[in-house]
Amino acid sequence: MSQAEFVIVANRLPVDRDANGGWRTSPGGLVTAMEQVMRGVDGAWVGWPGQPDLDIDPFDFDGMRLVPVKLSAEDIELYYEGFSNDTIWPLYHDVIAAPRYRREWWNAYRRVNRLFATAAADAAAEGATVWVQDYQLQLVPQMLRELRPDLTIGYFHHIPFPAYGLFSQLPWRRQVLEGLLGADVIGFQRVADAGNFARAVRRQLRYETKAGVVRVPTADDEARPAVVRAFPISIDTAQYEDLARDPKVRARAAEIRASLGNPRHILLGVDRLDYTKGIRHRMKAFGELLEDGRLNVEDVTLVQVASPSRERVETYIQLRDEIELAVGRINGDQDTMGHTAIRYLHQSFPREEMVALFLAADVMLVTALRDGMNLVAKEYVASRVDNRGVLILSEFAGAADELGSAVRINPHDIEGMKDAIVRAIEMPAAEQGRRMRALRRRVHDNDVQAWSRSFLSALEKTRTS
Ligand code: G6P
C-alpha cells in the first residue's frame, strides 16, 4: 500500500457497513466535519468500519483512501461500549450518568488504541502529518510517537474535557494525560476545556504549562513543547446554504408543515438519542406548557428526531425507555384526532431531509446538559437563509461561546426554558431577523474549512519551529 502524507485516525471510518453489505454515512458530528476536511486532500483515513470482525483491505471511497481497522465483538464490547462510552463519555460530560471504572475495559482500551496506532504508523509516509480524533483514541498520540518519531501529530478532542475535580476520578488519569501529550497540538472545543486539560496536567504530572504550551519532559532531557488550545469546530456552511436554497428542499419543507396539519408553530429537536442532550428536560418543559394552557396542541407541534445511538449500552437502553414513556404520556394526554403534541422519530435522515426540517421549524431546541460543540445548532443557523426562525441554545453546549445571539437557556431551569419557548414562539419577525443574521455571520465566517485550516496551520508551525 502506498503511504499517505496526511492521515486521519478516528474511531469510525466516514462510512459504516450496513446489514446488506453496502456503505452508509456514519453517525455523529465528528464524521460530518472531518469528511469535508478530507475532500480534495490526498490522504488516508484510518478507522473502524462499524461492524465486528470485518476484515477489509484499504479501499477508495468517494475520493478518500479508507483504511479499516478490524475490531472483534469483544473489542467493541470492552473498548467501544465499555471504556469509551460507559467510562469516558459520562465522566467527560460532567457525570450526568455515572461512569463505570472497570479494569478489563481499560486493558481493552489500551490494546485497541495500540491497534489504531499501528495502523496509522503503517499508513503514514516518512515525515507525514497524522491527525488523531476524539476520546476513543486518547492513547494513540503517545503510542504513535513512540512508533514513529518522524511524524507530526495533532489530536482534536470533540467532546468536553471535564473540570479537574471530576477528571481526577479516573483511575488511569495519568496514562490518559500522557497519551494525549504525545501530540504536538492538542485541540479542544472551548477555552474552558483547554484550561481544564492544562490544569489536570499541572496537578497530576507537575509539568510546566505557560501561555498554552506544555513542556513535556523527554528522555534526552530537552522538553518538547505541546500546544494546548481551543479550536471551535464547525460545519460545511456553504453546503447547508445551497441545500436551503434548493427549490426541491424548500418544497419538501412546505410538505412537512402540511403533513403535520399546518400548525402555526413547529418546534424542532434533532439529537442522537443521548442523555447528554437534555431531551427529557425539553419534553418536560413542552409538556407543562401544554398542560398549563400556555400552548395549545392545535397550534404547536414539537418534532423530535432522536437518531439511534449506542444501543447496547445500558444507560442508552434506559434513556430510550424513559423518553418513549414521556412521549407516550404527553401525546396521550394532549393529542386531538387531528393534531399531535410530539411527533417522535427514532430514525436518522439524509441531509436534504434535515435541511427541509430546519426550514420548516420556527424554533430549534438545543437543550444539551453538556455538549462539546453541538453542530446541529450551527446546521440550523446555516440553513436559515431566509433569516427567520429562533435558536434556543443551552449555555452548556460549546456552540454557546460563539452563538451569542441565540436565546440562551439553562436546561435544568424548567421554568426558564418554558419562558424561553414562549418568547421564541412570540418573537417578532424583525427581532428574529436581527438575531439570525448575526448568527449566520458567525457560522459563515467560521466554517469547518476555516477550522481545519486553523488547526493544521498551528500544527505546521510546530514542525517548523
Ligand atoms: C460524538 C463523538 C464522536 C462519535 C459520535 C457518534 O459526536 O464526538 O466521536 O463518533 O458522537 O457516536 P458513535 O458512538 O456512534 O460513534
Image (cartoon, helix red, strand yellow):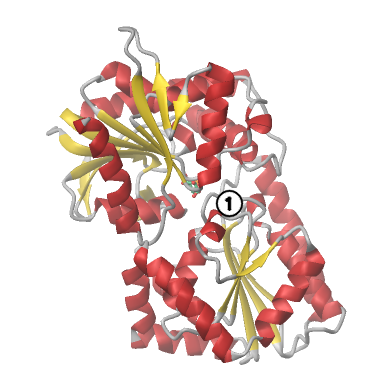
Tell me which amino acid carries mark 1.
Answer: Asp
Query: Crowding near pointer 1: few (<14 within 10 Å), some, many (20+)?
Result: many
- The residue sitting at the right extreme is 292
- The residue sitting at the front extreme is 211
- The quarter of the picture where the N terminus appears is top left
Q: Which residue lies at the image location 50% right of the left edge and 78% below the top edge?
A: 436
In the image, residue 392 above or below residue 18: below
Residue 283 lies in what quarter of the image? Answer: bottom right
Task: Report whether residue 198 is seen.
Answer: yes
In the image, residue 90 above or below residue 103: below
Closer-to-camera residue (138/201): 201
Task: Report whether residue 27 is seen.
Answer: no
The location of residue 351, given as percent across then percent down, is 41, 69
Residue occupied by mark 1 = 371
Q: Which residue lies at the image location 16% right of the left edge and 37% below the top edge?
A: 5
- The residue sitting at the left extreme is 2
- Give the SS element for disc 1: loop
The location of residue 193, given as percent across then percent down, is 54, 41
Answer with left or right where residue 341 lies relative to residue 217.
right
**Number of numbered discs:** 1
